[in-house]
Image (cartoon, grey):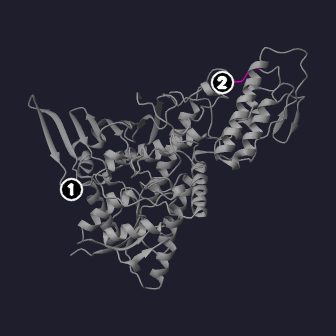
Amino acid sequence: MPKTLNIAVIGAGTMAQAVHLPVLRRRWDRFTIAALVDHSPRRRRESSEVWGIEEDKRYETVADLIAAVRAKTLAIDAALLSTDGLHVEDLLTLMRRGIPVLVEPPVGFSADEVEQVAGFERMTGRRLLMMAYPQQYDDSVTRMSEHIPVKDLRMVDHEVLMPASQPLFGSAHVTTASYDLPTEVRSQRRKALQAAVEAGAGAGATQRDRDLYVKGLLTGVAHQMAVIEAAYGPIARLVAVRHWPKGVIPGSIELLGELDGGAQVRLVWHYLPFAPEYSESVQVLSARRRMRVELPAPSHSDVRSTISLREKKSGVVQETSTTAPKGAVELMWEAFHAFVEKGKQPVSGAAEAAAQVTLLREVLSSIVGADGRSLEAEKDAADDEAHDAAPGDEVLGDEAVEGEAREDEAPEPAAVGGVTAQGEPELIVEIAEPAAEAPGTAAATATATAADDDATATADDDPAATDDAALAADATAAAPESAEPLGDAQGEEIVDVWHLSGETPADGAAGSVAPEAPAPNGPAADGPEVDAPAADGTEAGAHATGDPAAGDPAVDGPTLAARAPEDPRS
């Protein structure tokens, strides 16, 4: 008879209450909820009362949980890590005690962050992490390669239509969100999360880039990549990327990739806030067969997937359809039981998570590169300036002071809460006094005025960014009258991408950055924006969360600031 595992549930957000806890309660023959950890006193109390967890089994932090394990007042066999914000520190704390962990993605926001966990596993020689991608264990997904093997595979087309949170979690019983955290705790969590996102997206990334990285890639496309990996292996090469509509975050993302066997993969992820329901389908082609898999939302654990196969036999087209016997979430927990009890390796662990975040960073770089920018923009600009310096120019450090300022030397206004890798931006320009007003004078003056306005708005949103925004405005105003007028930043938006060739955009576009759209309810918070689904009806992704700054992991995953308004027509 299988052993009953004592599970510590860490994080009582929407994903835990709507997806995991119901399955743990239903599968009492395999699992026991031994402890619950949540930083919010109110949510910890209310969710514990709903799920019948005794008061002495409730803990505020993972450190408190481990202290009880060391004191032998609590015995746990494994843990579910479903908190908002950052995971790595809690993960390593659990893994050092030899506790296997089922983790809600993403593990981290950068390859270096995830590598800490993967490196620990390599050092110990034992895998202790399993990624919580339910559909990797769905019966229909695991049987895809049985109907069309890799050697016969021609094309895989995977499309997801993501609505707002209500169609995903409206029927789930979820207790109140955590708004009762002290101000200093909220601030600390916000800063730590923002620093991790900035490190993952790159020093040259704008706020829009970071939003797209978290809201579209880590919480959307990552799920699709996990399904393909479970059926046919990981995407080996990135062929092309496209993002649209212009300026809409997260909008729609299309990715073309190639598997090791040469088969092509097409992933399309749409965020449609007014869509009536979640939709996910996978179509697979071979020379003889066509297969279609319909997958329910991960939050609908009782809904079954279906797999349909069409082929021609003896001149007659035949179609067969099969429904999965169990829900994907329940099958995932059975796989986790086998992982803990028998050591059966999971489909995705720390090593796979590190490879995935590296590929997603490449996708982001391709989208940003099509806009004439770089995720390492500041470093690239300094290198180009030093390389292009004339022999007679005076070189100070890595920068050359030229007789005429170039258009792309004007620093970009600081993003809300953003800090450059080198600290405050510098601009060294030698300005010659003009004899008469140049044609670009009016445009340069207008640009300086806009920069002053941006600096004032930034100061209102984030007092910590006042110095950076003011410096950007001063530097813009100091541009020489003889310089060409700067590009209209307010008119530039993220452009479509359908290549990885790194073509240089037209003159004047390289220095342009798409403006940040205003938040619908006042100034944006100083963290990255996310329109992931939240329990209170706000928009969210399948693995995203509420506002971690407010201590509100409404849906488990990273929590960021209010999203930019989206055009319903998109």
- Above/below status of 378 relative to 542: above
Q: In the figure, residue 375 lies in which quadrant? A: top right
Residue 420 seen in this snapshot: no
Residue 125 in magenta?
no
Callout 1, which amino acid?
Answer: Lys
Task: Report the disc number at residue 488.
Answer: 2
Secondary element under disc 1, as helix, strand or loop, is loop
Residue located 51% across and 45% down the image: 562
Instruction: Say whether residue 486 is magenta.
Output: yes
Which one is nearer the viewer's eye here, 187 or 243? 187
Residue 411 in the figure: left or right of residue 501: right
Q: Which region of the structure is painted magenta?
A: 484-488
Q: Residue at x 68, y 40 (%)?
A: 414
Front residue of this view, candidates 561 and 499: 561
Main secondary structure found in the magenta portion: loop
Which residue is drawn at the image coordinates 75% and 35% (left, top)? 473
Label located before the other in sequence (2 or 1) = 1
